[in-house]
Every structure is written in structure tokens, then in C-alpha cells.
Amino acid sequence: MTYGVPYSFVPGTKAKADEVNANFIDVLTKIEDTNLRIDEANSSADSKNAEISSQFEEVESTLAQRANLDLSNLSDTGKAVLSAKANATDLDGNWTYKFLALASAATLSNTANTTYSLASYLPNDGRTYEVLFSFNGSATAASQYNIDTGFGTVYCFAPIKTNISGCMILPVTTRRTIIIQPTTLTSGTNKYSFRVNGYRKVR
């Protein structure tokens, strides 16, 4: 914005005192107006900062209340859940990588269940674990097998007259056994290797 004083002077001419004074007064007035606007802007900024600070304090107070370690803001059900987990370092647990060969180039039965025990492999602590399995094999005809880990049949795999391989993560209950079950679609000769590669606690 361009600013000009009330009076301008031409070189070589006399300036009137009241006009010079009027120019000074006008400049001082504009300075005072500018300072006033700056003070108002600073005051507004201080007010906004105080408001934001108050909001942050309110949020911190709310978070502190919700994270209250004496559990005063939780229902009895919530307290019971946390109490049950109080001694657990990890709710879901870390993976433990440990190899175990359950079968190697074995013939998988077409008529009977095949059962494997993980009692010596998994900790005996009454917990459910996720287990990482890997397998490979071959089939002479299309077949289908189910796997029961204690939750009922949770997975099926189907060698289709070819080589087959893969990995899967399955939950294993305190029963600590897995049962491979042939189905009405199972036929042919099925050779396979079955391995366990790791586990982690989930309950």
C-alpha cells in the first residue's frame, strides 16, 4: 500500500512551518495506527495460543484418565480381561523359530487318519499357539486331505496328480496334536514331507 504525506515541497521554495508540522503529525499518526494493529494482532495470536494450549491440556488429561493404571475407568469385565493378561509379556507372543520334521518322503494314507503329536515341541502351558507348517510331496491322482488342529477341520490341501509344496499357519490347541484326514476325494499314492518351522503364543 502506497502512503503519502499531506504536503509535498518543491526544491528551491520555502516550506511553511504548519505544513511541515502537519506532515510530521500525519506520519506519527500512521505509525501509531500501525503499532495499534500490531498490538491487536499479537493479542489475537496470544488468545489463540492460549486456546490451543488449553485444548492440548484437555486432551492430555483425557488420555491420562483413559490410561489410568488403577483401572478406575474400566468395567469389571475389562478389569478381568487385563488381569488375566497381567503376567503376559506379549498378548500375541513373539515367533520362536524351531525346526521339527514330522514326516519325510512318507506315504500318506488314503483310508485312515494320520496323527502327529506336538506335545514335546510346544510349551506345556495350557495356551493356544499358532504354528508355521511347510510341506511338499507328489500324487499319482487327484486327492484332498483335511487337517484338524483342535478347532475342527480348519484347512484342506489337494495334491492334483503333480508335485505340491507350500506353507501354512494353523492354530494348535492344548490338545497338541494335528490330524490329517483323507476325504472321499482321496485316491492314488501320495508321498509327502511335513515339517514344523516355528510357533508363537496367541492365547
Image (cartoon, grey):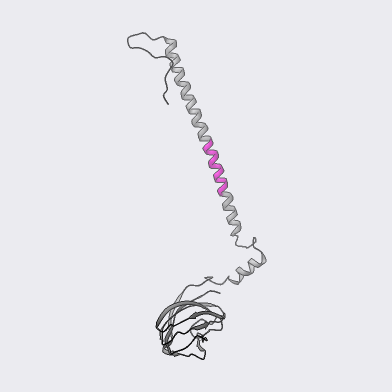
The answer to whether residue 93 is above or below residue 158 is: above
Name the spot of residue 175 as percent of width and height, x first: 56, 84
Does 12 appear above or below 163?
above
Q: Say which residue appears at 63% left-offset and 66% top-offset.
A: 78
Where does the image place residue 200, in percent across and percent down from the top left? 49, 75
The reply, left or right, for residue 136 in relation to residue 173 is left
2 is higher (above) or lower (below) than 17:
below
* 57 in the magenta segment: no
What residue sits 44% from the left and 10% below the top? 18
Q: In this picture, which residue range is highlighted in magenta?
A: 44-56
Q: In this orientation, which residue lies closer to the viewer: 114 or 33?
A: 114
Secondary structure mainly formed by the magenta segment: helix
- Residue 171 is situated, as x and y percent measured from the top left of the image, at 52, 77
Magenta run includes residue 45: yes
The one of 27 and 149 positioned closer to us in this rendering:
149
Name the quarter where the C terminus is drawn. bottom right
- Relative placement, left or right, of 109 versus 69 is left
Q: Position of residue 201 (x, y in %)?
A: 52, 75
Look at the image and tell me in which quarter the N terminus lies. Answer: top left
| Total marks placed | 0
